[in-house]
Image (cartoon, rainbow, N blue to C red):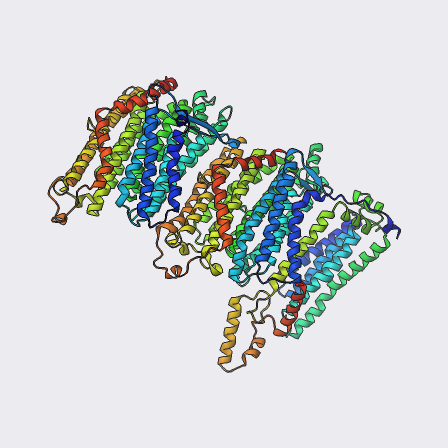
Amino acid sequence: MSVLAQAIPAPQTDYTTIIPELIVLGTGLLIVLMLAIRRFSNIGWYALIAALGFAAAGIVAYVDLWPEVTDGAATYAFSGMVAADGFSTFVVILSCVAGVLAVLLANSYLKREGLDKAEYFALLLFSAAGVQFMAMANNLVMVFLALEILSVCLYVLSAWNRDKFASQEAGMKYLLLGAYTSAIMLFGISFLYGGTGTLNIAALAQFFARNVLENQGLVFLGMALVVVGLAFKIAAVPFHMWAPDVYQGAPAPVVGYMAAAAKIAAFAALFRILFLGLSAMEVDWKPLLWGLAILSMIVGSLLALVQSDVKRMMAYSSISHAGFIAIGVAAASAEGMSGALFYLVTYTFMIAGAFAVIDCIGRKDEQYTKYEDYRGLFAREPLLAAILTFFLFALAGIPGTSGFVAKFVVFEGAAEGGQWALIGIGTVAAVIALFFYLRLIVLMYMQDSTERPDLAETRARVAAGPAVVLAVTVAATVLLGILPQGLLDMAGQAVFAL
Amino acid sequence: MEWFEDSALTIATFVPIVGAIIMLVIPKDKEDQLKATALILTLISLAVGIGILFQYDYSRAGLQFEVDASWISAINARYHVGIDGISLPLYMMTLGITVLCVIYSWNHFPEPHNPKMFLILLLILETGMLGTFVALDLILFFVFFEIVLLPMYFLIGIWGGPNRKYASIKFFLFTLFGSAFMLVSFIALYFLAEPHTFDIVRLADEGLDIARSTAVWVFAGLFLGFAIKVPMFPFHTWLPDAHTEAPTVGSVVLAAVLLKLGTYGFVRIALPILPEAAQTWAPWIGLLAVIGIIYGSLCCLAQTDFKRLIAFSSVGHMGFVMLGIATLTPTGINAAIFGMVAHGIVTGMLFFVAGSMHERYHTRDIPRLGGMISSIPRLAGILVLISFASLGLPALAGFPGEFTSMLAAYEPAAGLDAAVFRTFLIVAAIGTVLTAGYMLYMLQRVAQGPIPVEWEGKRLHDVNAVEYVSWVPLIALTVVLGVFPGIVFNVTNETVAPFFSGIFG
Amino acid sequence: MSGEWILYIVFGATALVSAIGVVFLANPIHSALSLIGALASVAGLFLAQEAFFLSVVQIIVYTGAVVVLFLFVIMLLGIDSADPREEQLLRRQWFPWAFLGGVIGVGGLVLTITGIDLPFGVSGTDTADAVNEAGGNVQALSERLFTDWLLPFELTSILVVAAIVGGVVLAKRTKDLRGSGMGLTPDLAERISEEVEADAAEGELDPEDAFEADDVDPDPDSDAVLVGETSENGEG
């Protein structure tokens, strides 16, 4: 009894720093609770709640936290478990935007496919919270936990269309490989702990500032394994094997969200761990990232050339985009990272928009996702074809779209560090990438679908949700392509304070 | 007229794209409204251009109508536009050619018709081209330079001939490949300049304090981007395909304006910013130029497709332009700009004629044609006149540019080996003979002789009203520029002479 | 060679061997049993580190709850136990694993409650000092868990909620898939019903009976009802 009576120190709780996350999590739990009490037959209500939750969290983060965090240094809360700074707040806002887009995309999809279970939105909210905590995590265990929250939700969402074998396969593959790499990452974290005696990322930096390790082997191994674990999440070559199958099998609205969310989270964690925690080992991790970037860009672009399924092609394209973003992180400079952040924002919009179109064209059961099904699309669905073309060009990085500015800023970050070889390879990869986007465009515009009467039978329906997503993403992609200054400033502020 | 100075270029450049947006909301079946909108907006743009022509101070060197506003400050990219003697003729030519293209396409929309999209693309194309000629910031330049690609890609790919897919992709990839490396060079220039800047004027004025070897590499990236666009031998292979497959209007714009973007890039960016590297590269550029002249002419002799023949003749003509640039002398660069304008007008016109012939004969196969003088004499007359201009007959537009360019090759800039360039001069002169040869050979087969059995008794329409309206300005200019080349030379020289003699002394 | 080292070698080796067994054994029951061995060995490793409480939790949660649940599911899915020799084999096999787990579990429990130091081990390190200062394993752990590690602790609950929600959603059957279990695809279901109908057409069996007797069916109707109910409850 005496032991029980002995007071333990009160935990340090600073809930104001994690208000957006609390809103997102709270909304998710609210949906779960509501489901337990009574199910609305129309899941639109849950979608509305989820969208409001994301919007509220995003607005709070922007209005309340953003002005605070951009003036000063980072605030650490919960005994140094999380850090609220410009960087994390930026990612939080971005994840909320991605969340709203995902909700809008999902609502009509779920109804159309008869998969309308509101748990979808709860998982979406939880996964977004995972992204947010990953960006805020100042402790390797927090990174791991947040990553797991994100991953578990994504595994389930990938397998959502469980009447479809491909979707099940996607979920299963993602789960198995994901669990495996999670273990590897955990292994790496334990090595880092063994080598430095701390799990706190800020304390890691202090450790390296005070100590010189005679033998870096243990720490290096730990760092490498952590990088491997995160590289898996961003689908960087050679840890990309899961991506094509998952992208192809998972529902299009899920992929449109997952491709961005997983990248945002993993790049945020990579940046925090490597740039803030292990900056003393820059010479060691830079080559790792270079390797990942180069391989991802080249392999992703080359393999995308030979695909015949649009979703699969987008998977390889996303691999190559991961390479481009990695260039920004590998620059190991504030410029590079703010470039990478900008890239992530533009990618979030582009990929959501592209998959919104793919979803509409796929129609029920996503039966039309083969290249063959896109034959003569322009004649049948001029507007959708035009929008998809626009996104493909944006993904390829044609000037006038946000994709160009994004590629440009990461290249600029690399140029600052004198990494001309990386830029050269990136340029070649961008040209190769253009070719596979063009292949699809050729099919849509320059061939007719006369030998496919089945395609002409039904017209693709664009529901309200995807229509809004398309409008928003097209507008954002154009706007960020022509007047990117505001967002570039924000991305700069997010990183320069560190 | 302060406001006009500040906004004229912006208005003239962006009016077409505004028109494209307006046309987006006009229903597809209201064809007359669509055509009228496109015509009116291109005319507005042209009118502003003519206003610029009147307000331009011809006695002054340097940039006018300059606007320099903040754009993307995070990367120091600015909205910096301006016009001078180098860009003014090209800018005006672009404005004019687009209007004529809109008029010509009035009832000539190739399959699959869809005038709405066709005209929208044409207007976007115009903004891209105009923007490239006035941009004074590397990033702005690059954006416009690339925007041009997309509409042209679709024009070829959708309205093109049977082999359009191959041609359009080849066109797109070739040019994009080059411009990707050009972009790397732009970024390199940015970081090599102290303080970092993308401003073309400042980069040229302040010069770069860099090693010659670095400069040579940076120039290589620029060279790749521009040379593919020109196109210079051996990067020209996309051109015959693109020209052959493109619809008439596409070919005209391609020949008249798009090819000039590359040569303009050399004159505006590559030479002024990297003069030392330019000197290193000049003999090689000259060599490729004359190879292009001879090679283009020889290929022409072997062609049976009328449009393909004109396309290869472009390779030759652009060779003369590049030879002028390679001399690095004010004379050579004046000649190059004149050559660009002349080639734009003459070859643009040739493609118009080719398009109209194709419309009448439904074939471009030269052996199947013949006897045009007897069957459709007016069209034949125009063809003969323009062909003579193209082969460089004095008193027509083709002559002054080529002649001056060869003249410049006799005495290249200090630091270049005169002997080498005189050799080029001789080779180029042989090229002119070959040019005359293939043009006359073509005329002999197409225009002269009896009407082939295939066309006997068939009624072929001669030149109609729409064609006259769109052609007369070009025909008139062909003659006027041939007789009074000073119209262009005086404008260009005022800028070129002080500028380039300052650089290459 | 210290006692800790010996324990590390022994338990490490058994952990490794049984982990390999989990992957390579053909019979799912054997795999599950092997998993018990692996988890129990890890508990032993904790023991060697004087992390008694963790060791006990490891046994109770993983061996006691998780693997038992696995076994339960495997049994529900219908392990083919027609062969009596197989059953014999099973009976003999699970015994050593259960014994190992039991010994470690009980040992850990005793050590935790009594707070006895092992005659060897890790005392003298920071962790051991902190444990002693707090007055034992449980106290030290709980103090850390509810102060510094509060946020990760709470987040773990979110992770668990997410996993449960996901699991329930995926496991719950859709209306039209009659009597199918987890992982039964429409293709497979279609094949089954086709076979059933074919059989019925041949007049061999009544379709209903045939369905239950069908070899392909991994989940007989009687059990399916049970699973269905559990998932309904789980969701509530």
- Say which quarter of the image contains residue B261: top left
Q: Quadrant of the C terminus of chain C?
A: bottom right
Query: In the rendering, at what x and y percent does residue A4 appear?
Result: 85, 51
A336 sits left or right of B304 in the view: right
Residue A342 seen in the current view: yes
Query: In the rendering, at what x and y percent does residue A187 appear?
Result: 66, 47
Query: In the rendering, at what x and y percent does residue A372 appear?
Result: 40, 56
A376 sits left or right of A352 in the view: left
Residue at 80% x, 46% y is C122
Residue B198 seen in the current view: no
Compared with B399, C227 (above or below) is below
Q: Residue furthest bottom?
A: C203
- Say which quarter of the image contains residue B387: top left
Observer-nearest of B240 and B353: B353
Q: Residue furthest front?
A: B1
Query: In the rendering, at what x and y percent does residue B98 appear?
Result: 31, 37
Compared with A24, A457 (above or below) is below
- Say which quarter of the image contains residue C85: bottom right
Residue at 32% x, 29% y is B50
Observer-nearest of A399 and C89: A399
Observer-nearest of C62 and B97: B97
C11 sits left or right of A376 in the view: right
Q: How many marks?
A: 0
